[in-house]
Amino acid sequence: MTINTKVPVAAEARFPSPLRFAGCDPTTAIRYRTEHDRVRVYPCITQELDDPETVFERAGPREWITDDPANMTVAIVTCGGLCPGLNDVIRGLVMSLWHHYGVSRVLGIRYGYAGLTPAGLEPFELTPDNVDEIHRDGGSVLGVSRGAQDVAVMAERMREFGISKLFVIGGDGTQRGALELAGVLDGVSVIGIPKTVDNDILWVDQTFGFDTAVDIAARVISDAHVEARSTERGVGIVKVMGRDSGFIAACAALASLEANVVLVPEVPFAMEGADGLLGFLEQRLERKDHAVIVVAEGAGQEHFHGLKVRRDASGNKLHQDIGELLCERIESHFNEIGKPVKLKYLDPGYSVRSAPACGTDRIYCTRLAHAAVHAAMAGKTAMMVSRWSGHYVHVPLELVTQGRRKINPGGSLWRTVLEATGQPCLAEGARNGESCR
Ligand code: F6P
């Protein structure tokens, strides 16, 4: 498969980088990256190797930058929902801009794209002193908001502030806005940083904050397990975020190793019948007397019919509450068959998103932030920094915005979930020889 990995350039890099790797041991191999530093897009998936030369630009400092940093105004905006690590990214950007390059005018845009309109709150200046300790807190010191804004209006506002580099931290919708902005702004670098707790962005190994989300959700699954195991016929249900992608549910289930059933949006399931969820629960309770179900919020939408579609401010479909539905159906089914269960329902959704980042996410956030600064200083635009096959790279926003990443029901992650939980194929018709994998 051939894809266009060329990263656009907003402004020519004619100014020598002030970054001199001062203090480094001269024997280390730290050096500027050149355009010859590349990472294969398909490093090892043999099926895709029909075009082994497709490569991403490697992230990192370039020898030449666009301008004198002393005259630059740079801005940072955080959009969409919260995600662990937002403050770490903001901190990493500010520290790198100030200390590595000497940029001292860094504007924090308030409450997402709304802050780039005249109706929004005024930006405030970010300095090493006021971001020094923000990584200890969850959320974003800038605030977030959902929803697109008029691109021409935002561009005009950016011109008024004299912004020549914009860092956009957000999900696929936000990156679509960033791409449009880059298209109307002359000479301005617009650099995306991949954020969604759902881990549903294309062309990145993993979004930042996801490790933290998995850790927290896994602890809640363990709590549900303790509750379920401690009562007769105990059933624990844990609903986690995951609008259209079930990565948190799948990975938290694997991290806890206490889940018996995982339900994700990518894999529809049958409720009734011997091959359905209720039938499986009957068998499980007979055998083990307790069960734990992990459900992503977007799972099982096939069980709601004829309801009006509602959307959030970003245009995302608002799903029906599968957690509540599962509670109702499980309770009523087991009451009907005269074998009631004790049900405990846990929904850690917003607690997962609003937590401070864990250690691995902190490292990741800082590395993404530094890579983003280097890319912007070199004049790159309409691109997102990413970790791809373990390497930090530049991915054009044109690619990032082509869809959302989902669990492949035929892939190894989902297979591992089935293997680790022992859950059968709960899809309608499984008995007739249809495979789940
Ligand atoms: O950012 C993704 C996400 O966390 C989804 O999992 C969830 O459906 C959505 O955001 C909820 O966000 P909010 O309540 O802020 O609109």
Image: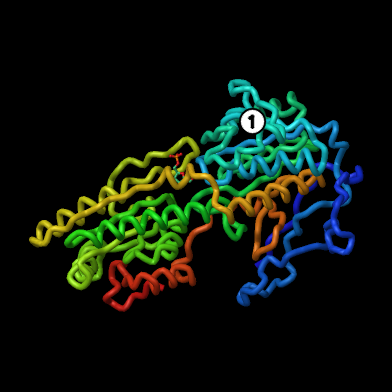
Residue 183 in sight: no
SS of the residue under disc 1: loop
How crowded pointer 1 is (Cα within 10 Å; few <14, some 14-19, many 20+) is rated as many
Q: Please name whichever residue, 397 or 113, is drawn nearer the observer in this view of the structure.
A: 113
Q: Please name whichever residue, 401 or 143, is drawn nearer the observer in this view of the structure.
A: 143
Quarter of the image where ligand 1 sits: top left
Residue 181 in sight: yes
Q: Amino acid at mark 1?
A: Ile
Q: Quadrant of residue 231?
A: bottom left
In the image, residue 142 lies at what x, y percent?
59, 32
Q: How is the image coloured?
A: rainbow
Position of 261 with respect to 279 (left or right) is right
Whether residue 424 is situated above or below residue 84 in the rendered picture: below
Residue pictured at 39% horizontal, 59% vertical: 264
Residue pictured at 66% horizontal, 51% vertical: 398
Task: Please give the residue where the numbered disc 1 appears in the rendered image.
Answer: 109
Whether residue 113 is situated above or below residue 24 in the rendered picture: above
Residue pictured at 76% horizontal, 40% vertical: 97
Q: How many numbered circles are shown? A: 1
Position of 387 with respect to 242 (left or right) is right
Q: Quadrant of residue 203?
A: bottom right
Residue pictured at 34% horizontal, 75% vertical: 434
In the image, residue 18 lies at what x, y percent?
88, 44
